[in-house]
Image: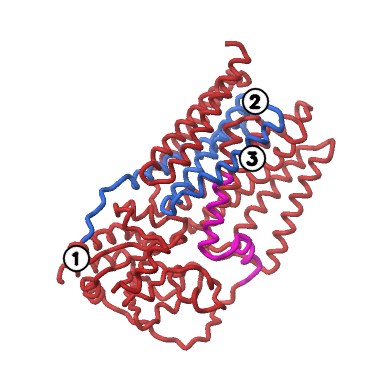
Amino acid sequence: MNAEQLKQTIDLAYLFGAVCFILAMKLMNSPVTARRGNRLSMLGMAVAIGATFFNPAIRPENLLLIGAAVGVGVVGGLIPAYRVQMTAMPQMVALLNGLGGGAVALVALYEFLDALQKAHVPEPVQRVTTVLSAIIGTISFSGSLIAYGKLQELLPGRAITFKGHGTVNILLGAFTLALAAMILMMGQVTAAAFFALIGLSFVLGISAVLPIGGADMPVVISLLNSFTGCAAGLAGFVLINNSLLIGGALVGASGLILTLLMCRAMNRTLGHVLFSSAGHVLVAGTSTKVAKQPKSYSVEDAAILMSNANRVIVVPGYGMAVAQAQHQVKEMAGKLEAMGVEVIYAVHPVAGRMPGHMNVLLAEADVAYDKLYELEQANPLFPESDVALVIGANDVVNPAARTDPNSPIYGMPILDVDKARTVIVSKRSMNPGFAGIENDLFLNDNTVMVFGNAKTTIGKITAALDNY
Amino acid sequence: MTLVAIATVFILAVFVGLEVISKVPQTLHTPLMSATNAIHGVILVGGILVLGSSEAPPMQVIGVTAVLFGTLNVVGGFAVTDRMLEMFKAKKREVKK
C-alpha cells in the first residue's frame, strides 16, 4: 500500500466511524434497539481509534506513551463506570463531559504551541477553530467540574452568587472574546497570550455555572455536553478529520435540542435558566402566609387508602432517587397489583436531576416501561384516580405553577396530582425543595403527608399492606 | 479536503444531529445524553494524533493528558450508557387487570 492508499483507507475508517455514530443515534429512538445503538457506536469508535494508529505521522517511539495513557484511561474509566449508582448518574455524566472538554482544549493548546514552535502559520480558518475549540473546551471543562461539585454535593446546590455577578460574567465573556480576537489578528502571538485565553475561559466556566441552582443542573450539563461536541467538531477542522467533524457536530446539535426540550418542559427560556440567578441574592423568610399545618398520616393510614383505591399513580422525584427507594416502590406496586389496584407511574420531564432520570431508576427496579406515563398522558388520569402517591417530588407537582403568577415556576407544566381524590406525599420534612419554592399542595385539604425517608416509608407501607 | 468541503461535512452533520435526535422519547433522554457524551470522546483520535507526533517532554505532557482525558471520556461514557440501557431491555408486558 502506498502512502496515498493508506491515507484513503484511514479516512474510510473515519467515515465508517461517523456512520456508526449516526446510526447509533437513530437506534436510540426506541428502548428496544437503544442498547444495540450504543454498541454500534462503540464499534465505530474502536475502528476510528484503531485506524489512527496507522497514521504515518505517529512516531513509533511515542507508541508506548500512547499505550500507557490509554491503558490508565481504560482502567480508570471502567472502574467508576461499573461502580457508580444510578442515582449518581448525572454527576458521572458531568464529570466525563468535563474530561472530554478538557481533552479538546488540550489538543487545541498542543496545535497552537506546535505551530508556534515550528514557526508555521496555519490557515485562517484553522487558527479560528483552534482558538474557539480551546475556549469552548475549557469552559466545558471548568463548568462541568462545578456542575459535578454541585450534584455530588461537594458544593452547595443553591445558587452561589453576589451582587453584580451578572456584570462580572459579561465582562469575563467580553475579555475572553477580545483576547481571542487579538490572538487571531496579531501577526506575532506568544504562548502567554494563549495561556491567558485558556485561563480566562476557565474562570468564565466556573463563574457562569456557580450562580445556577442545583435544580437547573440538568439543563447545564446538557448544554455543556453540546459545547464539548461543538468544540470536538471544531477540532475536526484543525485536524481535518471526518470522525471528529461529524461526531462533534452530531453531539453539538443533539445536545442543543435536548437542552431546549428541557427548557420548554420548564416553560423557561435558555437565557432565563443561564442568566436569571446571577446577582440575585435570595432573601430567606419573606413568606407572609398564615401558617397552616399539613395533615400528617401514619404508614398504616396510607396503606389502607391505597389498598382501597381503584388506581394509584406514583409520582417519583429526586427524593426517591436519593433514598434509593425505587426497589421498595416496585415491591409495593407488586402487592397493590396483587390486590387488584392498578399502579402506574407519572414521570415529569424534569423530575430528578437529569431528563429521564426517573425512567432510568425505575428501569433499574425492573418496572415495565409501558407503565411509565409522560405528562400529557398522565394528567387526564388524575381526576379519575383515587390516590396520587408523590415520592420526593416537589416543584413538578406544585399547583402554584398554574395559579400564582408571582411564583418563579408560574407557567411550568406540572403533574396535576391535586386533582386526584387523595394525594399522599412521602417527604422528609416540610422544607421547600431544591429550588426553594413554597408548595401549597402540602396544605391542601385532600393532601396527606407521610414524613420520613422515602425508602423507610415505602418499605413500611408495603409491610402494612399485608394486613389489608 | 478544501475548506468548503470540511464546512459542508460539519454543517450537514449538524442537520443530521438535529433530525435524528428530535425523535428520541423522553424515557431515553438520560442514556441519550450519556451516549452522545461518549461520542464526543472521539476527540481521543485528536489526542492520539498530537501525542503520536510529539517530540519533546513539555508537549508530550499535554498530549498524554489529552489522551488520558479522552480515553476516560470514551470508556466511562460507553460503559455507563451500556449499563443504563441494559435495564431498558424489552420486558414482558405485564397483564393489566
Identify the chain of the residue marked 1, using the numbered disc in the image: A
Q: Amino acid at mark 1?
A: Gly
Vertical side of A345 occupied by A305: above or below:
below
User: Comparing marks 2 and 3, which lies closer to the viewer?
Assistant: 3
| Label 1 Cα crowd, 10 Å radius (few <14 / some 14-19 / many 20+) | some
Element on which disc 1 rests = loop
The residue labelled by disc 1 is A340
Q: Give the residue at the far right of this rendering.
A: A187
Under circle 3, the secondary element is helix
- Residue A96: percent from the left, percent from the top? 51, 44
Instruction: Pick whichever, B91 or A203, lies toward us.
Output: B91
- Find out whether residue A278 is within the magenta segment: yes
Q: Range of the magenta residues?
A: A252-281
Image location of residue A198, percent across then percent down: 69, 45
Residue A56's disc number: none
Q: Chain of mark 3?
A: B
Residue that sits furthest to the left in the current view: A467
Using the numbered discs, state the Cα–Cα distance from disc 1 to disc 2 in whole angstroms.
69 Å
Q: Which mark is residue B11?
A: 3
In the rendered image of this protein, which colour is used for chain B? blue
> Within 10 Å of the Cα at label 2, are there few (<14), some (14-19), or many (20+) other Cα atoms?
many
State the residue position of label 2.
B54
Location of residue A52 (image quadrant): top right
Going by the image, does A145 lie left or right of A188?
Answer: left
Q: Position of residue A443 (x, y in %)?
A: 40, 81
**Residue A338 placed where, x, y %?**
18, 62
